[in-house]
Amino acid sequence: MRRFIIEREIPGAGELSQEELASIARTSNEAVASLGVPYTWVNSYVAGDKIYCVHEADDADAIIEHARRGGFPANLVTEVANEFGPQSAELVAG
Amino acid sequence: MTLAGAVSPYPGAVALLEREHELGVLQTTITTATAGEGCGVAVSGDSGTGKSTLLAAAIVSARSTRVLRGACDPLSTPRPLGPFRDVAPDLGLGRMHLDDGAPLAQLCEEILDALRTEPTVLVVEDLHWVDAASAEVLRFLARRLDGVPVALLISYRPHETGTDHAARPLLGDFARLDGLATVELGPLSVAAVADLVTGTALDAERVHELTGGNPFFVTEVAKDPDRPLPVSVRDAVLARAADVSSRDFEVLQLVATAPDRLDDRVLPALDVDLPTLRRLDSTGLLTRTRGGLAFRHELARQAVESTIPPGGGASLHARLLAALETIDLPEPAVLTHHALAAHDAARTTYHAQAAAAEAIRAASHSEAAAFFQTALDHLADDAPAADRARLLQSLSLEQYMVSRLDEAIANVRATFPLWELIGDVAGLADAHQTCATYEYYNARRREAEAQADAAAAIAGDAGATLAYGAARAARGFMAYMRSDTDLALTCVREVDRTPGTVPGPLALKTDLVRDLSDLVCGDDDARGRVADVIDSARSHRWDELASTGYSQLANLDVEHRRLRSAEHVLEASLPFTVDRDIPICRHWQTGVRARLHFFQGRWSAAVEDAERVLDERGMPIARLWPHLVAALVPMRSGAPEGSPHLDHAWELAGQIDEPLRLLPVLSAFAERMWMSGAADSRVTDDAVRELERLTGAPGSEWAVGELASWLLRLGLVDKQPTPVAGPFRLAGEGRYDEAAGRWHALGEPFAEAMTLGDAPDPGLRVRGVELLDRLGAVGTADRRRVELRAEGVAQVPQRPRASTRANPSGLTNRQLDVAKLVARGFTNAEIATRLFISPKTADHHVSAVLTKLDLPNRRAVVLRADELGIA
């Protein structure tokens, strides 16, 4: 599967309560389960008026379909080309 | 895959051929509009003629301009404001939940303001399914496009928008108004069909004959040229799904069952997965639109829907309903539609009531009534009587709001036995009270009085003091209307003595009845007190009471010839009744304004107002003045006889039987008899008798004077009775010149001319004829000419070819507004700003005003404003 970052514009997202996030997660899980194609919701980050999600699927089409079924916006869907972090410094001898 | 991309229902469903002219019209409209000069086009065509394809092609040329699309759906009762709720988020109006109960007028302004901010192409398709509130909003917008950067594009099927259709007035505007146009899409020619089937073995002539040139049908045939030629659109569509599995075909049927679209959020609950959608994409029948899955074309939807076996539809609707109930904020109108089709009576009643409540918030009263009716029709037989009574009452209120008084009355009457059954005396008294009000608006005064008396008796027996007070106040109001001021004041005193009524709307209502009674009796100070009551009611937001006050004040001002005052009252009150959505007062006050214009000799504006009330089926009580105006204006201008308006007025006056309504109707019959010379017993018997009976009735000095004047001209009485108003008394004393001067000062030129004509002095009589000619009352002037010639008066003025001197009799209401602003020295740019029109339109109106007034320039209007009565 390929990994995608999805940017969702949701005014007031930062104010969402734990209960509201739980309800959104339930809707999202149901949408994932209904797709009938390989799909993994990895994690999501609430930041100001936006939510950034990391999902895995075979194509961007499935990412859009998930958003539709959940009733979520998907303002920007970008495939993750690579990942790195502090540990990456050690991987290639300098 | 394509099911991921589309935003509009059917673009590309039909090939675009032989539409160059229509496309050009739309493209020009978009270019002009987005440059700031708003305009609109209605695309008319039957199903499959390519309306959506044409609109989509035109929008391509709009490039970066904002495009907003709203759609109307084939629900059993439409979603109130459906298309506007589609576009609200993009307009920055949120989801437009209507929870705050903003009146429709305010919503109209908000939408217009939101459209001003950037160039926009606003597309609303399928107007044949529009709801009444959306039609109102569209009409509001269509009439204010000037200077707003909006291209308003609509589409509709001409054969599904008959004369009673909610979209009719709007479509009329598109046919008539500047800046709006209609294009009609017809069938394709054989040549165009040949273009479409070129390169295939299909015979163009045969395909044309088979399809009737319907572009959708031809396109479908051309997509599958190797199959046997289908005999119908249905076959052509179904051929595309021939290879689909039965399970997938059931999904198509589910989509066909949703008349608007299958909301994406219900796909999980319906077990429709992504691979299924990918397989169905190969049929080319579906598209994604407005957050849902829909057919590319309505004809395709109908074809698939037709495959659902009898009885199979209900279970599909039930599945959809259950799925829709699991998502957030479903639309109650859509839920009602499915519950109804699923034969689920309990769900139908439940959702229909929610849909009605939403329709009320959208001021969509005809839809609200339809939903309440649906709820009532499906209410369980063993439902509590109180539920049924409340539902009936809600239904009757909405029917009243749309002038369906007979049904409103029948439904409120149907609650009587229910309230009795459960022993709810307050409910019963209230129902009689409501019935009294509706009966009165329905011009059945006696029945209204009986109902108010019943309400008072029931409430009085039960010691329900508030209900008793309300019933007596209503009875007092009706007594005032009937010039029975003694009874009116008696009722008011009773309410004042009833404990627990002060302070509140009831106390204020009794103040109003008392002050109006004083005013009608000639106490001039009472006018200020009535104005205070209106102010107080407005500040408490007791809108109906404030509006009733306005209605009566304006009517009495006109009746007693305080014409300038009446004009000021109506300028404030008519927008108020529109804004607060009080139809009875809007119609009544428009009728009063018709009579005001009529007295002022502004015939065109008078007829315009009269026709508006009659066209909109204003309630019977509000139709009296309009009928009189519609009868008398043509008569005075010399048009041939034959309109039934006087007969309608006679019938109404008989039912209402109020002196201040009856006397003017009798005057109109007398005027007709004087004009035609044909004897009429309603004049020779009724009028003579009623004049004697009603002389001295409170407030009748003007109406009595006028009737007596006509009867004098007919030789049916020999003097003016006492008391009559000043100008009549002066004429009765032979002081015609002075009386005419009074009419001149009052601003009633026709009465001035008639008074001059009554004088023995030939000089005055000739002046009277000249004045009638100038007013355009050529019919009346001709009658006077005959008289003068018969008596051998020399130098009778010739019949004019056309009105040659300035007079405002031909100005419409809009032109009068413009003329008044010109008279106050405003520039065209200032007039444009004040009237929310473009400077170009303001120029246009000002030229029309100058032409009609036959004045060379605006300075002349300023100088002669007083004389023209527009200062």
Image: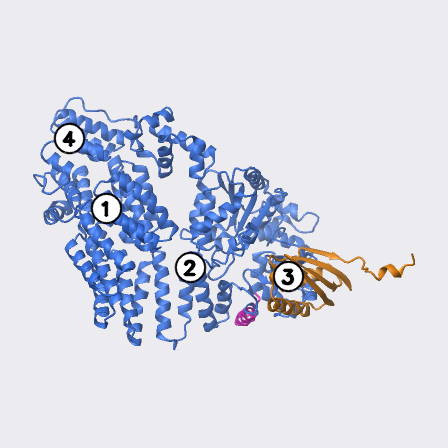
Chain colours: A orange, B blue
Q: Secondary structure at mark 4?
A: helix
Q: Which residue is mark 4?
A: B738
Q: Which residue is mark 1?
A: B527
Mark 2 to mark 3: distance in Å?
31 Å
Mark 3 to mark 4: distance in Å?
81 Å
Q: Where does residue B839 sit, x and y in percent of width and height?
A: 47, 33
Q: Main secondary structure of the magenta part?
A: helix
Q: Secondary structure at mark 2?
A: helix
Question: Extreme top residue here?
Answer: B795
Task: Specify whether B206 is left or right of B181.
Answer: right
Query: Which numbered disc, 1 or 2, marks the residue that appears first in the sequence?
Result: 2
Going by the numbered disc 1, the residue's amino acid type is Arg
Tell whether position B482 is magenta: no
Q: Where does residue B609 sit, x and y in percent of width and height?
A: 32, 43
Going by the numbered disc 3, the residue's amino acid type is Arg
Tell whether position B312 is magenta: yes
- Determine if residue B539 is in view: yes
Q: Residue B289's image quarter? A: bottom right
Mark 1 to mark 2: distance in Å?
35 Å
- Determine if residue B212 is in view: no
Mark sitting on residue B360 = 2
Question: Extreme right residue here?
Answer: A93
The residue lying at 32 percent from left, 48 percent from top is: B614
Circle 3 chain: A
Going by the numbered disc 4, the residue's amino acid type is Glu
Quarter of the N terminus of chain B within the rendering: bottom right
Task: Specify whether B436 is left or right of B117.
Answer: left
Q: Where does residue B697 sit, x and y in percent of width and height?
A: 13, 49
Classed neighbour count for the residue bearing mark 4: other residues with Cα under 10 Å, few (<14), some (14–19), many (≥20): some
